[in-house]
Amino acid sequence: MKVIVADQETETDYYGAFVIRGVPKGQHFVTIKYGDSVLVENRRMNTEGRNSSVEITVDERIPARFLFQGRVFDRNTKEPIEVFEVATCKDFPDMLQPYLLKRFREQRHPEGIVNDRFVTLGDYTMYVRSRGYAPFPLQFTIDENWDLHRVYEFPLYRSATLEAVVYGPNELSISGAAVMPRQGTVHGTAAGKIDYMSTDSMGRFTLYTLPIGIQSFLIYHIEHGTGRAIVELEPGKTTQIKIQLPRKGALTGDITINGKPAKFSEFKRRTSGSGVDLTRSINYNAPGQYEVVITPEPVTIMAAVNPIDGCSWFDRRMELNAVVVMEEPTWLDFNFSAGPGTIYGDVSLRETAPRAVFVEIVYNLGKDSQRERILYDLGTTSSFRLTDLPLGSGTFHLYASPRSMSKTDFASARALMDRKEQSFELDAANTSVQIDVAL
């Protein structure tokens, strides 16, 4: 496309970007053309600072280089959906952004075929929805090797509803609190729409326009402050939650396992010895959020969780530091995440086979001795393969014994077991590590 400003012109690159040098400082009016067609006229831009993106609707005036085709159908019946709506944005946002809700456009096809056209390279997220169905997000990347003949699938789930009531720190419901995605985008800011809605006079809001799965919300009120909620939406179901904004002086933050809201099995403030147990003092003021009131000073928190379905470990815990202040909530997140890492190997004991094998993986989480520990019971195995590990560096500890042992016995018996440790590092270039242990 041709860009004209201050009697100078240039063309956009494959990513839709352009730069014109040598123009006078200040504000200018920009015109964008394709061939003889004027697509944008008198768009204000400034040489000082960052200019917002220019959005152009791709129509018959612009020959599209990249054609997209997909198939929309009911996930359960596999029947095609003939009438549906489509909206697309650049990049891979964590959630459906509020500004996109008004950009869905209807398409019709008897076989549920969705068609779209693109003119620039880049990462895209396309959402397809239909009446009674939740939006389905599909992420894809257009590059020079784009396959024009590939057909993407959009298996739509039945829509989900979220009903919530928002309370202030004083436990009274609050109206006018903005409900927004926790992670926004530059495009949403430029479009001037960053929230889904605000709470009504009873502090309530209802959302039925979001995809199925994990949704992470930020709640903001100018007087009462900021709160969060992490919700898992299920097809065809209504989820009802309460969100209470944290109090000033409280320690608060996320508590999740693999992105899903969870609760602590242990929560201790480390002092001398084993620490002060605060597990029963925790208030879960929203799904995936905790709050506890402690004295304002530097603290070290030791927190543990039990596994959920799909986890192969039996105990996981973090030690994190924070400085609690009285003037505002102190945020400290405990997100126990899975990753693409794998550690595998073989175990052998002198003159006998192991009857009990345990592994403890300790990650270094930065300075001040912050760490995460993951415990596995490998039973009587002579080989192991630990998957879904986060990337990072730390120490691998293997404990083995010729006697059988339960998980509950391990904590007291570990000091007497045969043990070997080895440092490791998992990163994007090397997601797997082999560690063979001979004791």
Image: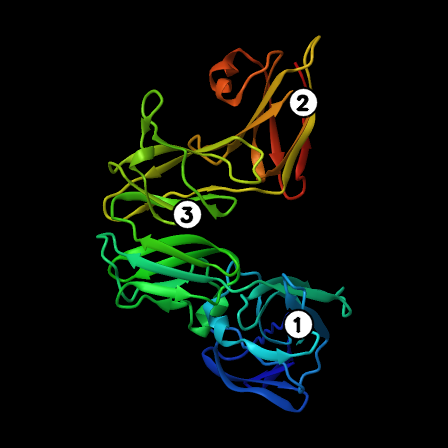
Local secondary structure at mark 1? loop
Report the residue marked by disc 2.
381
Location of the N terminus by quadrant is bottom right
User: Which residue: 60% across, 74% down?
Assistant: 18
Work out whether residue 237 or residue 334 is closer to the camera in this orientation and state it. Answer: 237
Residue 228 visible in the current orientation: yes
Marks 2/1 in contact by CB < 8 Å: the verdict is: no
Residue drawn at x 32%, y 66% is 199
- Look at the numbered disc 3 and give the secondary structure of its residue: loop
Residue 419, horizontal then vertical, whole percent? 58, 16
Query: Relative to 91, is 348 above or below?
Result: above
Local crowd at mark 3 within 10 Å, few (<14), some, or many (≥20)? Answer: many
Q: Where is residue 352 in the image (x, y as percent from the top left)?
A: 69, 10
Nearer the observer: mark 2 or 1; the answer is 2
Q: Nearer the viewer, mark 1 or mark 3?
A: 3
Q: Establish if 90 lies above or below 248.
A: below
Crowding at mark 2 (Cα within 10 Å: few <14, some 14-19, many 20+): some
Say which label, 3 or 2, has the lower sequence index. Answer: 3
Q: Could you tell me how far apart the alpha carbons at marks 1 and 3 are, in whole angstroms? A: 38 Å
Determine the residue located farthest toward the bottom in the rendered image.
Answer: 36
Residue 295 is marked as none
Residue 349 horizontal side relative to residue 217, left or right: right
The quadrant of the picture occupied by the C terminus is top right
Q: Nearer the viewer, residue 362 or 80?
A: 80
Earlier-in-chain disc, 1 versus 3: 1
In x, y percent, where is residue 256?
46, 44
